[in-house]
Image (spheres, grey):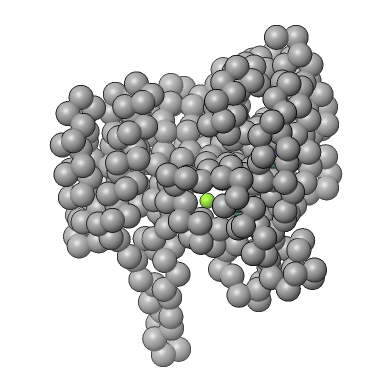
Amino acid sequence: MYDVTLIPGDGIGPEITKSIREIIEATGVKINWEIVNAGEGVMDQYGTPLPEEVLESVKKNKVALKGPITTPVGSGFRSVNVAIRQKLDLYVNLRPAKTMKGAPTKFENLDVVIFRENTEGLYAGIEHMVGDDAAESIKIITRKASERIVRAAFEYAKENNRKKVTAVHKANILKLSDGLFKAVAEEVAKDYPEIEFDNKIVDNMCMQLVQYPENYDVLVLPNLYGDIVSDLCAGLIGGLGLTPGANLNDELAVFEAVHGSAPDIAGENKANPIALLLSACMMLNHLGEKEAASAIEEAVAAILAEGKVLTGDLGGNASTTEITAEIIKKVKEN
Ligand code: NAI
Ligand code: MG
C-alpha cells in the first residue's frame, strides 16, 4: 500500500484522474490516495488556489499525481502550476516523447526525453512596466540550477542506457545567460565521458527534431525552451493527449501530463486520459511497480495499434469512460 497525494485539478482533471484511479486499481497495485485540491475549483472555499495543505500533503507523501490546474484571474498567482514547482523546488521537468505505433502522426522515430529546467529562466516571474509603453521581463540563469538540471539529464542517461545528451540554448545571442547554461553543460559533460554530448541552438533544434528525430536522445533545456520544445515533441508524437510528464527533485515527485485543463471539452466525457495515464506509469515505475506500469503501457500501445477505441483528439469517437473500460479490459487480459 502506497500513500500518494492526488490533486484532481480543474476542467478535465476530475474525469481523467478518476479514469487513472480505476485503471491502476485493475493492475492490483494498492494506493491510498490522499485527495487535496488546488486551482479554480477551491478558490471560493479557501480564498487561494493553492492551499497550504496541498504542499504539505506532497511533502509528507513524497509522491503525487496531479491533474491540470486553471489559474484564476486575480488570485495573485501567475500560474498555480508554476507556483507548485517553485515552492517545492521541483527542479526537473521530465517529459518523454516517443512515437507509438498507431498514434495519429506522420512523423516517426522520435524517442526523446526532455529535461526542462523548472525553477528559473524566464519563469522567475520578474516582470514590470517601464513607463506606459515598454515592459521588461528578466531571465535568470544560475550556475546552481543549470548544473543540477544538466546533471539530472546525464544521470538519467546513464541509468537508462541512453547514448547522448544535447544541451539546447540560444547562447549565440544571449551570450551571458544562455552562455552560462551552455558552459555549465560542457563542464558537467566531462564527468560523463561514456555519454555523447553535443549542443544545439534552440531554433535549429526545432528543425532538427522534425527532420532528423532519430539523431536525438536526451535533451536538456532552460525553462521556456523546454516548455516550447516539449509541446513541439508532443505534436510530433500525435498530440497533448499522449504526452506524459513529471516534476522532480531529489526527494519529491509530482507526476502530471503536459496538457492543461482543456476547458473546451471539460465535463463532456471526451478527454483522452492517456497522457495522465502514462504519467501515472512513470509514477508506478518510480514506486518500483514496474510490472503494473508495463501492463498499462502495453494496453495503451495495443489500443493505439488497433485504432478502434480512440478519443476525439486521436481521430476516434470513444468517450473517456469507453477508452478507460477498454484499457482496463486489456490490463486484466494480460
Ligand atoms: P490545454 O492543454 O488545456 O488545451 C489545448 C487543446 O488540447 C484544447 O483544444 C484541448 O481540448 C486539447 N486537449 C488537451 N488535453 C487533452 C486531452 N487530455 N484530451 C483531449 N484533448 C485535449 O491548453 P490551453 O487551452 O492553453 O490551457 C487551458 C488551461 O489549462 C489554462 O488555464 C492553462 O493555464 C491551463 N494549463 C495547465 C497546465 C497544467 O496544469 N500543468 C499546463 C498547461 C495549461
Ligand atoms: Mg506548456
Q: Is residue 79 above or below residue 59?
A: below
The residue most toward the top is: 334
- The quarter holding residue 167 reads top left
The percent coordinates of residue 241 (x first, y second) are 64, 36
Q: Report if residue 203 is visible in the image.
A: no
Q: Report if residue 154 is visible in the image.
A: yes
Q: In this view, does 196 lie above or below 16?
A: above
The residue most toward the bottom is: 131
Of residues 14 and 322, which is closer to you in this image?
14
Of residues 107 and 178, which is closer to you in this image?
178
- The quarter holding residue 270 reads top right
The C terminus appears in which quarter of the rendering?
Answer: top right
The percent coordinates of residue 293 (x first, y second) are 60, 23
The percent coordinates of residue 163 (x first, y second) are 29, 24
Q: Residue at x 43, y 26 (%)?
A: 111
Q: Which residue is drawn at 34% across and 21% down?
A: 161
The N terminus appears in which quarter of the rendering?
Answer: top right
Of residues 99 and 296, which is closer to you in this image?
296
Q: Residue at x 59, y 23 (%)?
A: 289
